[in-house]
Image (cartoon, rainbow, N blue to C red):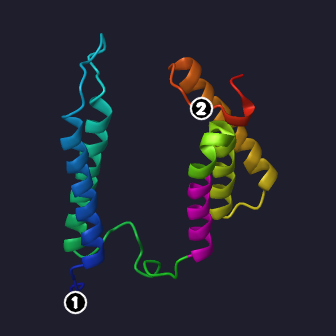
Amino acid sequence: MAAHRRLHIGELLVSLGLAALGIFIVAGAGEIGGTGGYEQLGPRAFPYLVGTGLLIIGAVLAWQAVAGGWRSVPLDEAHEAPDWLAFLILGAAILLHMAAIAWAGFVLASTFLFALIARAFGSRRVLRDILCGQVLSLLAYLLFTRGLGLNLPAGLLGGF
């Protein structure tokens, strides 16, 4: 007997939302000024890449939703109860980062963002998570400020 295929409305709406976001990004990238340097890559290249990727992923997921549901989620695990504590920790991490980055600086705010997200994903090793977040945040800060010449908020640590 053939498997019953049905339209998954929620999956289709998320898929179409991704495709629409891709179209929005590609359309907006056309309004970015500037031309490519000697590499022929300008400021539009990355938004075009991201927008096209979202459009393709949205189209593939929409096709799967219409053809019986997304393929990557086994049916027995597709409708587990959400982990609301993890969701709240993730939300708090993002809000804390947004509130703290201006006065605490990129490195400290991103360190605690990393540690809280690790906790939301189930880590119980707080000191290790803070240390990893500190190292990754510091490397990102140095790459962007010294390597690329961008300004990120130094905050409490100052401009070392």
Position of residue 15 relative to residue 111, above or below, is: below
What secondary structure characterizes most of the magenta part?
Answer: helix
Q: Where in the figure is residue 148, as x and y percent of width and height?
A: 50, 20
Side of 144 relative to 11 (left or right): right
Q: Where in the figure is residue 82, as x and y percent of width and height?
A: 52, 78
Position of residue 26 relative to residue 149, above or below, is: below
| Residue in the image at 25% along x and 70% along y | 13
Q: In front here: 19 or 33?
A: 33
| Residue in the image at 72% along x and 22% along y | 160
Image quarter for residue 122?
bottom right
| Residue in the image at 31% along x and 14% along y | 39
Q: In front here: 71 or 44?
A: 44
Whether tag 1 and tag 2 are in contact, CB under 8 A, the answer is: no
Q: Residue furthest top?
A: 38
Q: Which residue is mark 2?
A: 140
Residue 57 belongs to magenta span:
no
The amino acid marked with disc number 1 is Met
Q: Which residues are magenta?
A: 83-96
Q: In front here: 69 or 18?
A: 18
Q: Residues within 10 Å of mark 2 (few under 14, many from 20)?
A: some
Q: Residues within 10 Å of mark 1 (few under 14, many from 20)?
A: few
Q: Where in the figure is residue 29, as x and y percent of width and height?
A: 23, 37
Q: Which residue is mark 1?
A: 1
Side of 24 relative to 39 (left or right): left
Q: In front here: 13 or 109?
A: 109
Image quarter for residue 30?
top left
